[in-house]
């Protein structure tokens, strides 16, 4: 008798518990990163650096499809283009970010730049969800003293012949 009451209660409580998990899963953005057009995506590093979104393996399951393109010039510098394509609820949001990796950059600099630009591109999508409470945008003011020193001419426009 007690066992049948327990099973009935369990049958009513389990769907409520599963429904709560589904609602929580819908609050995260599903992202698919398409690296088939060249360039390195460093997906393991990106998954660690951007834990606020969920990465999926099928582009049709994604809310945001990111296409990564890389072009290399003669000095072996790489110019990356990240095309953010919104899907499902985000179908009206699209953006493109471009950045350049200097030729002598090591892997750490490359993956840090990639993750930083991926984060920047995801901001408009995250603003449309409840995840906007879990991140903040930090803007740094340029160091004018260092910039002035870089533009300073130590020879005061002298001309040598």
Image (cartoon, rainbow, N blue to C red):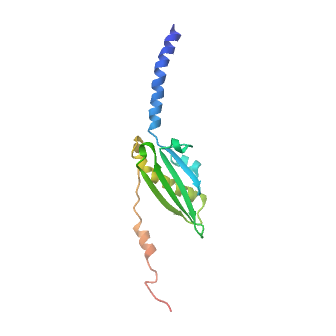
Q: Is residue 2 above or below residue 99?
A: above
> Residue visible at 46% across and 21% down?
13
Residue 41 visible: no
Q: Where is residue 8? Give x, y as percent.
A: 48, 14
Residues 161 and 98: in front is 98
Q: Work out which residue is located at the far top of the displayed protein and give it.
A: 1
In this view, 6 is above or below 88: above
Residue drawn at x 58%, y 68% is: 73
The residue at 53%/46% (across/down) is: 32
**Furthest residue toward bottom:** 161
Residue under the image location 46 percent in, 89 percent down? 159
Horizontal side, residue 88 vs residue 49: left or right: left
Task: Find residue 52 and report its horizontal and vertical position in percent.
Answer: 48, 44
**Vertical placement of residue 79 versus 60, above or below:** below
Q: Quadrant of residue 23?
A: top left
Say whether residue 149 is visible.
yes
Percent position (x, y) of residue 57? 57, 43
131 lies above or below 2? below
Q: Position of residue 148 (x, y in %)?
A: 41, 72
Q: Quadrant of residue 74?
A: bottom right
Front in this rendered view, residue 24 or 160: 24
Q: How many marks?
A: 0
């Amino acid at each position: 008798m007690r066992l049948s009451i327990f099973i009935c209660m369990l049958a009513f409580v389990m769907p409520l518990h599963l429904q709560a998990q589904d609602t929580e899963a819908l609050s995260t953005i599903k992202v698919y990163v398409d690296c088939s057009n060249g360039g390195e995506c460093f997906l393991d590093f990106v998954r660690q650096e951007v834990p606020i979104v969920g990465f999926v393996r099928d582009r049709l399951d994604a809310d945001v499809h990111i296409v990564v393109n890389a072009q290399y010039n003669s000095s072996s510098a790489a110019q990356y283009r990240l095309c953010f394509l919104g899907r499902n609820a985000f179908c009206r949001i699209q953006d493109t970010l471009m950045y350049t990796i200097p030729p002598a950059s090591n892997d750490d600099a490359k993956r840090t730049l990639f993750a930083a630009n991926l984060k920047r591109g995801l901001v408009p999508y995250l603003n449309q969800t409840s995840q906007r409470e879990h991140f903040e945008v930090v803007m740094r003011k340029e160091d004018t003293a260092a910039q002035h020193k870089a533009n300073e001419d130590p020879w005061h426009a002298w001309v040598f012949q």
